[in-house]
Amino acid sequence: VRQTAPELLEHGPGKDCGPNCRQVTFASSVGRYDLWGDYIVYTSSYDTTGNEAYLANVVTGEEWRLEQGPWQQPGPTQITVDSGIVAWVYSRFPGVGPYLTELVRSFDIESLAYRDLTCIEYFSSDIAVIREFDATAGALSFYMSQTCSNCTDIHTISLVDGLLERRTQLGKGVIETRAGEGMVVWTDLNQNNSEIMALDLATNVVGNLSDNPFDQF
């Protein structure tokens, strides 16, 4: 844990987009993004400085750079925000050792505390890295696999202690995950036909939301 203020960016009012519209983000582009209250978080695409993570207050117009990736490295990729906590995935190719490492980091908007939650190492390019990153109830949810690209599972990381847990078992895989109100939902490909499943993070109970003889997504 390290406590430091992120870099406050200086910019003008932005481009004129009409009487009922104003510019609120000022990076070169917007990749992944998420919203919570008066805040928007997002990653920028590659430019001369690499990928970056940003936080902006849409009411005050202030914007901060949370983290900057090195040139020719993925840098911050997935990003989410919930209950005043921003979390993102920082990806890099080490050059030696693992094929890829993904560091999951968070930033508390109120206390200005950065936290390193976990580091995941992949030793093959034939894997599925962190996707559909989302936050709810003090946890981050996503799907990934460290063994193959078609056997993804639901995973969660606690925003409190960084505990990484696999919530589903290996099989044909899961896709299309979302989280909110203490629940994680996804499309499960392990059934005879695809089903929409839900996990209650408080009780750890998994239920089927779309039991049907035809595919559901």
Image (cartoon, rainbow, N blue to C red):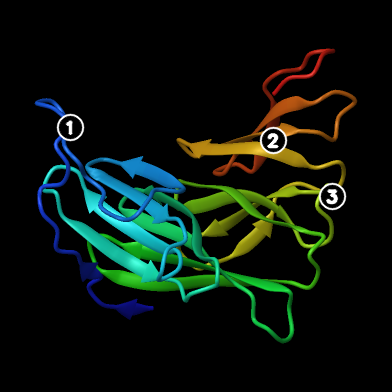
Q: Residue 130 falls in which quadrant of the image?
A: bottom right
Q: Residues within 10 Å of mark 3 (few under 14, many from 20)?
A: some
The quadrant the N terminus occupies is bottom left
Which residue is painted at 26% across and 60% down in the image?
A: 109
- Left or right: residue 8 compared with residue 98: left
Q: Residues within 10 Å of mark 2 (few under 14, many from 20)?
A: some
Task: Say which of marks 2 and 1 sits in front.
Answer: 1
Residue 170 — which label? 3
Which residue is painted at 78% across and 59% down in the image?
A: 127
Report the amino acid beneath label 1: Cys
* Residue matched to label 2: 206
Looking at the image, tell me whether mark 3 or mark 2 is earlier in sequence order.
Answer: 3
Residue 88 — which label? none
Check contact, mark 3 vs mark 2: CB within 8 A.
Answer: no
Which element type, helix, strand or loop, lies under badge 1?
A: loop
Report the amino acid beneath label 3: Leu
- Left or right: residue 189 compared with residue 178: right
Image: 70 above or below 105: below
Check contact, mark 2 vs mark 1: CB within 8 A.
Answer: no
Report the amino acid beneath label 2: Val
Task: Say which of marks 3 and 1 sits in front.
Answer: 1
Give the Cα distance between marks 3 and 1. 48 Å
Which residue is painted at 45% across and 72% down in the image?
A: 69
Label tally: 3
Residue 17 — which label? 1
Looking at the image, tell me whether mark 2 or mark 1 is earlier in sequence order.
Answer: 1
Image: 73 above or below 176: below
